[in-house]
Image: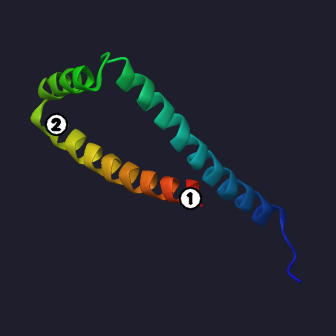
Amino acid sequence: MHEVTPDAAAIFLRTEGSRMAEQLDFWLQLHQLNKACIATGATPEERANSLAMQFKSKAPAAQKEAAEQLLNVAVALATLRAQIDEASSQ
């Protein structure tokens, strides 16, 4: 059996703690994103219009980055939603 040194234990705990924090952070960030989205308008259309106006006011480089981030998040959330729906039906 291998001896667990204090350094190895500390690294393990930091790594596991970091993973747990990242997982929790995702759900907290999702909650914050939902609140921010809802705050931009009363209906989905109002929200989209408001956010599109904000997007158009950004510099081209910021628009490019925001568009890439939006695509990444939209794909990830659509995939996640499908997996959550599948898990919920089992």
Identity, as a three-letter code, of the amino acid under mark 1? Ala
Q: How many labels does the image show?
A: 2
The residue drawn where x is 65% and y is 50% is 20
Circle 2 sits on which residue?
63
Q: Where is residue 1 in the image (x, y as percent from the top left)?
A: 89, 83
How far is mark 1 from mark 2, CA to CA? 35 Å
Tell me which corner region of the image, top left, top right, bottom left or bottom right, holds residue 8.
Answer: bottom right
Looking at the picture, tell me which residue is in the foreground, 72 or 16. Answer: 72
33 on left or right of 51: right
Tell me which corner region of the image, top left, top right, bottom left or bottom right, holds residue 64.
Answer: top left
The residue drawn where x is 83% and y is 62% is 6
Circle 1 sits on which residue?
87
Of the 4 image quadrants, the one containing the C terminus is: bottom right
Q: Where is residue 16 in the image (x, y as percent from the top left)?
A: 68, 57
Identity, as a three-letter code, of the amino acid under mark 2? Gln
Q: Nearer the viewer, mark 1 or mark 2?
A: 1
Q: Residue furthest bottom?
A: 1
N-term-proximal mark, 1 vs 2: 2
Looking at the picture, tell me which residue is in the foreground, 86 or 53. Answer: 86
Residues at circles 1 and 2 in contact by the CB criterion of under 8 Å: no
Q: Is mark 1 on a helix, strand or loop?
A: helix
Tell me which corner region of the image, top left, top right, bottom left or bottom right, holds residue 58.
Answer: top left
The residue drawn where x is 54% and y is 35% is 28
Q: Where is residue 67 in the image (x, y as percent from the top left)?
A: 20, 42
